[in-house]
Amino acid sequence: MATFLSREVCPTIKNILLLDSEGKRVAVKYYSDDWPTNSAKLAFEKSVFTKTQKTNARTEAEIAMLENNIVVYRFVQDLHFFVTGGDDENELILATVLQGFFDAVTLILRSNVEQREALENLDLILLCLDEIVDGGMILETDGSIIAGKAATSSNMDDGASLSEQTISQALATAREHLTRSLLS
């Protein structure tokens, strides 16, 4: 007997947001029709940012209830990560999705999680969103797998793997710092 998972049984994600320190979009993806227009989406993003900006979600994820939605969020440097689910969703599942997204972004940005780096690697971050959730259904929550698939999808550095790029990037950065220190 074939079984399948329906949307009523599977946990679903309504949106994943990556906002800057002023509440402006860096990367967002909506999987629900709860916000049909762009202005409704922007209003939701503003209300989420306003409600959460005074909290201290830098070390671990925090949870808030907003407009009959559960929002799990975390802040790092000048980036704010948010995952939204319905009010009947399990907070631990939403937190796991948030952690997977955060870990993937951290790997892609080579632990330099800040807005400038995120904007330079926006294509990879959007690929991560596609690897995590499809149509609201959770596909993957392991950050290293998500980052690896995103890096493979974009054919970074002529097919070099993410781990090889990280090493070559680290060597290039070390070379650059050494050159600077010798020249000054």
Image (cartoon, rainbow, N blue to C red):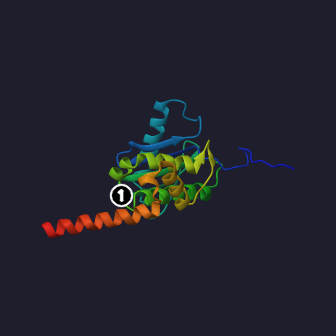
Name which residue lies at 49% across and 50% down.
82
96 and 170: which is toward the camera: 170
Give the residue drawn at x 38%, y 57%: 113
Residue at the outermost right position: 1
Q: Which image quarter is the C terminus in?
A: bottom left
Q: Examine the rendering and report whether any part of residue 138 can be seen.
A: yes
Residue 57 visible from this viewpoint: no
Residue in view at x 38 percent, y 42 percent: 24
What is the secondary structure assignment of the residue under circle 1?
A: loop
Mark 1: which amino acid?
Answer: Gln
Across and down, in percent, residue 124 comes to 45, 49
Q: Quadrant of residue 27?
A: top left
Task: Give the residue pinned by disc 1.
Answer: 77
Taking depth in this image into account, of 164 and 90 the one nearest to the observer is 164
Observer-nearest residue: 178 or 79? Answer: 178
* Front-lying residue, 178 or 146: 178
> Which residue, as the protein is rendered here, is positioned at the far left?
184
Q: In the displayed structure, does residue 166 sit left or right of residue 84?
A: left
Image position of 79 with respect to 45: above or below: below
Q: Residues within 10 Å of mark 1 (few under 14, many from 20)?
A: few
Image coordinates for residue 64, horizontal then vertical, percent: 52, 52
Instruction: Place residue 86 in its image quadrant.
Output: top right
Q: Is residue 176 left or right of residue 86?
A: left
Query: Residue at the spot x=47%, y=60% of the render?
Result: 161
Residue 133 in the image: x percent, y percent? 59, 48
- The total of numbered circles placed on residues is 1
Residue 116 position within the rendered picture, expressed as x and y whole percent measured from the top left: 33, 50
